[in-house]
Image (cartoon, helix red, strand yellow):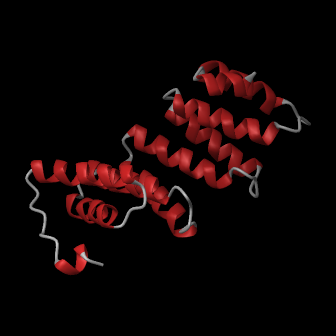
């Protein structure tokens, strides 16, 4: 029931169903339910609850299958709360520990956006520029370009690209 509601976008019902499974002492899906309860709460905008649930998950399952995913849930939740520096730190720690993660570009965009929102425009422009020049997914290049244009429209003067940067 929780998974179906989660997939349908009914995060309130999903969270309640995952909670019921998590509370059962010997249920084989208890660990998974604990993580998806936090994820459902993140997606329904209950950021503090998601952070607390991931803290509990990481305490109950220090070697759990979703421990790293919980760190990303917490990073997203901190970003949602406006705690950009904490979110940034969580994203960067994850990327440092998982340099080959398939979501690297997506998470690097979140790092750039968090820097931009935190007012660190110079660093944000470097992140966006790196993504603009070195991306595999076309959507990453477009998002990085949009970030650079936003910074430029806000008055930040971007250094010109060198031939070496353009023709690698």
Up/down of 101 relative to 37, above or below: below
Q: Residue at x 44, y 59 (%)?
A: 89
Given the current orientation, which residue lies at the most extreme right position?
A: 26
In the rendered view of the protein, which quadrant contains the C terminus?
bottom left
- Res 68 visible: yes
Q: Position of residue 159 (x, y in %)?
A: 12, 69
Q: How many marks?
A: 0
In the figure, residue 121 lies in which quadrant? bottom left
Q: Where, by quadrant of the figure, is residue 18 drawn?
A: top right
Evaluate whether residue 86 shows in this view: no
Q: Which residue corresponds to the image point at 66% horizontal and 21% vertical from the top-left?
A: 5
**Quadrant of image for the N terminus:** top right
Going by the image, does 161 lie left or right of 99? left
Please provide percent x and percent y for residue 17: 73, 23
Looking at the image, the residue that sits furthest to the bottom is 164
Q: Nearer the viewer, residue 99 or 136?
A: 136
Measured along the vertical axis of the image, is residue 59 above or below residue 132?
above
Q: Is residue 21 left or right of residue 59?
A: right
Apparent side of residue 23 relative to residue 168 in the rendered image (left or right):
right
Pick the front one: 140 or 124: 140
Pick the front one: 133 or 99: 133
Q: Is residue 20 above or below residue 86?
A: above
Residue ID at (30%, 66%): 133
Give the image location of residue 70, x and y in percent.
62, 48
In this orientation, which residue lies closer to the viewer: 27 or 163? 163
């Amino acid at each position: 029931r929780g998974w179906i509601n989660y997939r349908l976008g009914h995060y309130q019902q999903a969270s309640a169903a995952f909670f019921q499974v998590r509370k059962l002492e010997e249920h084989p899906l208890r660990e998974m339910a604990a993580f998806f309860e936090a994820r459902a709460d993140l997606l329904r905008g209950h950021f503090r609850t998601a952070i607390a649930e991931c803290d509990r998950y990481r305490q109950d399952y220090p070697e759990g299958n979703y421990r790293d995913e919980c760190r990303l849930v917490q990073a997203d939740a901190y970003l949602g709360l406006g705690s950009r520096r904490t979110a940034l730190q969580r994203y960067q720690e994850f990327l440092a520990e998982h340099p080959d993660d398939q979501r690297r570009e997506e998470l690097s965009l979140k790092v750039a956006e968090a820097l931009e929102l935190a007012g660190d425009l110079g660093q944000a422009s470097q992140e966006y520029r790196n993504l603009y020049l070195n991306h595999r997914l076309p959507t990453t290049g477009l998002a990085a370009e949009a970030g650079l244009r936003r910074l430029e429209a806000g008055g930040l003067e971007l250094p010109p690209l060198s031939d070496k940067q353009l023709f690698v």
